[in-house]
Amino acid sequence: MILRIPIGCADKKRALVYRGVIIRLVLLLLIYAMAEEFGLYFMPEDTVHDDFKYIQCAKYYVEQSSSLWDYNAFADAAASVRQYVSINNENFWFIYNCILMKIFRGEYIIRLLNILYAGISIGLLYDLTERLYDNESAVKAAGLLAYMPYPVVFCCFPFKDQFVMMILLYFFNFVWKYKENKCSVKDYIIIALHITVIHFTRSGLDMMMIAFIGLYVIIDSFRRNRLNFKTISIIIMLAFVLMVGGSALLGKVIYKLGSYLGGRNYSGSRIMRYMAISSPLDVIKLPFSYAIVALLPVDFNVSIKTWYGMIARINVIAIPIVLGNVVQMIKKKTDMVFYWGTMFFYFSTLIMSTMIYRHYFCLLPISYMHFSYYWNRENRSFKQAIGLASIILGIACVLYF
C-alpha cells in the first residue's frame, strides 16, 4: 500500500521520494484542471511575479528564435519581461526555460522537471539528516519535505527555487562526505559545476557556498587537531576566491544589506515588515527570523482564489516547526560546527535574498532537519505544550496577518 513505509532504511527513503513525486504529479494535474478557478501560476499573471515572467520570456523566445540557441532573440525575449541580459548575469533560469520550451513546445516540461528536482531533494535531505543525526530523524525531515503543503504546491510552478534547493542539499551532503573523506573525483566535478550554475542563477549564493565549505573544513580541522594537506589547500583556495571575488561580493552584500535594512516596501506583508531590520536593536530578530522562515508565506489578506492565497492560509500548520526550531537553538548540538555553520549560511541568505519570501524556500530543509532531530527526543508533555502554543499562535496569525 502507498501509505505504508517499508522497514528497511533504503526502502523508507525510496518510499518517501516515490510518494512525494506522486502527490506532486497528481496536484499538477489538478492545477491544470482548475486553471480557470485558480489560474495556472502561483500568483496572479503578471510579469512582476517570477513564475509568469519566466514562461512569458520563454514563449517570446520560442516564437522569435531561428535556432535552438539564438542570443539576439533571447536578449529581446528577456527585455520583454524587463530582464536585461547586458546588465544582469543571473540569466541561467531564463535560458533554461527558453531552451526547454523550444525543444518540448510547452511549459509542462518545466513543471515536471521541478517535480523531479523535488523528489531528488527529498532523497538528499534524507541522506543529509541520516549522516548528521540518525535514521528516525531522516524519515521525519524527508517526510516534512515530501508532505508539507507549501513544498508540495510550490514546486509545481516554474520557479527556480526548487532547483536551488536541490543544489544546496547536494552541497551540504558534499561537505559532510568531505569531512568523512568519502568524496570522489566525480563529487568534486559536480560541486564545481553546481557552484558555477548557482553563480548565474542566484549570484552571491555561490560565494557563500565556497565560504561555508572553506570555514567549516578549517574550523573542524583545528578542532580535531588535523591540519593536513587538504585543509591547507582549502585555506589557499578560500584566500584566492576572496582576493578575486571579494570586491564584487562586498558590493553585492552592501547593496542587498541596504534592501534588508529597510530599503524595500513591505506594505503587502506584515510578517515581512516584522523580519526587516531598521535599527541596531533589531539584530535580535535574526535568530527568530530563522524560525519564522518555516512559516512563510502566511497572509490572510490576499484572495483565496490563487494558489498563493490558499497556501498563505494553510501554512499556519507549520507553527509547531517554528516553535520547535526556536527551542532547539538552545539545546546541545551533536555537531556544533556544522549546526552553527548552517545557521550562519541561513542568516547570510536571509540578508542576501533582500526579504523576498520565495528565496527562502531553498532554506526549508535546514529547518526541517534540525527540528526533526530535537522533536523526536522531546517528551510528551513538551510536545503537548508546543501543540497548545501553536493553536494560540495560529489564532493570532488569523487575526493579525
Image: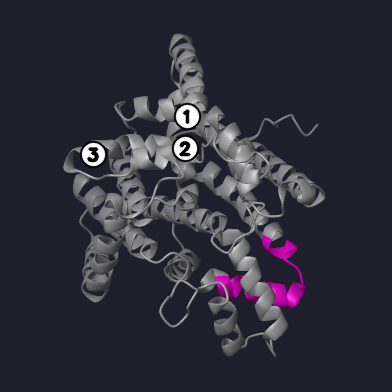
| 47 vs 139, nearest the viewer | 47
Q: Is residue 16 magenta?
A: no
Residue at position x 48%, y 52% in the image: 169
Q: Main secondary structure of the magenta part?
A: helix
Residue 291, how many percent across, how many down? 39, 35
Mark positioned earlier in the residue sequence (3 or 2): 3
| 331 vs 73, nearest the viewer | 73
Q: Do we see residue 102 in this rendering? A: yes
Residue 104, how many percent across, how many down? 76, 72
Describe the element under mark 2 as helix, strand or loop: helix
Asked whether, in this view, residue 55 is left or right of residue 387, the answer is right
Mark positioned earlier in the residue sequence (2 or 1): 2
Residues in magenta, as a range: 94-110
Give the residue pinned by disc 1: 321
Residues marked 2 and 1 touching at CB (< 8 Å): yes
Kind of residue indicated by mark 1: Ile
Give the residue pinned by disc 3: 282
Give the residue pinned by disc 2: 294
- The answer to whether residue 340 is above or below residue 84 is above
Quadrant of the rendered image containing residue 228: bottom left
Q: Indicate how the structure is coloured in the image.
A: one colour
Describe the element under mark 3 as helix, strand or loop: helix
Residue 328, how many percent across, how many down? 36, 27
Describe the element under mark 1 as helix, strand or loop: helix
| 295 vs 268, nearest the viewer | 268
How much space separates mark 2 and mark 1, taking CA atoms? 7 Å
| 277 vs 228, nearest the viewer | 277
Quadrant of the rendered image containing residue 253: bottom left
Residue at position x 47%, y 78% in the image: 84
Residues marked 3 and 2 touching at CB (< 8 Å): no
